[in-house]
Image (spheres, rainbow, N blue to C red):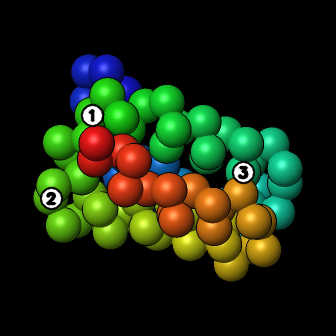
Amino acid sequence: MDQRPQQALLAVRDILTRVGTQSGYTGDSLGIDICVRFVERNLPDHRSILQAPGHLTALREICDTFIDAGWPQAHRLIYGIEQIFR
């Protein structure tokens, strides 16, 4: 994440949207915990990457996979996303 934050964000999105739902990963509590930590701990240090519309869309798609699976943590993460930009 520190060396290539844009690629890390897009790779996480690609893995979750292509394989995460089919494999059941997004239905696992470990999956949502890792997603929340990824966003809360890593993205504040690299918030400038979210200025690109494609990267912000990637973040939304990551969270959407967990929202679609019914995780309230993903909803809270989205509602608190503005704190990343502070």
Which residue of the protein is positioned furthest toward the bottom in this rendering?
A: 68
Q: Secondary structure at mark 1?
A: helix
Question: Is 37 left, or right, of 43 in this rendering?
Answer: right
Picture quarter containing residue 48?
top left
Query: As rendered, which of 61 and 83 lies closer to the eye?
Result: 83
Label 3 to label 2, Cα distance in Å?
24 Å
Instruction: For the C terminus, give its image quadrant.
Output: top left
Q: State yes or no: discs 3 and 2 in contact (Cβ < 8 Å).
A: no
Up-down: is 43 above or below 2? below
| Marks 1 and 2 in Cβ contact (< 8 Å) | no
Identified by mark 1, the residue type is His
Q: Which residue is depicted at the point 27% across and 34% down?
A: 46
Residue identifier under label 3: 32
Label 2 CA crowd tier, 10 Å (few <14, some 14–19, many 20+): few
How far is mark 1 from mark 2, CA to CA? 12 Å
In the image, 48 versus 81, the foreground residue is 81
The disc label shown at residue 46, or none: 1
Give the image location of residue 53, x and y in percent.
18, 67
Q: Is residue 32 above or below residue 68?
A: above
Q: Secondary structure at mark 3?
A: helix
Q: Earlier in the sequence, mark 3 or mark 1?
A: 3
| Amino acid, disc 2 | Ala
Picture quadrant where residue 19 is located: bottom right
Residue 19 visible in the shown view: no
Secondary element under disc 2, as helix, strand or loop, is loop
Question: Residue 16 in the image: x percent, y percent?
Answer: 58, 59
**Neighbours of disc 3 within 10 Å: few (<14), some (14-19), many (20+):** many
- Which residue bears the numbered disc 2? 52
- Kindly tell me whether residue 33 is visible in this rendering: yes
Residue 78 placement, left or right of 31: left
At 84% from the left and 54% from the top, the residue drawn is 28
Image quarter hosting the N terminus: top left
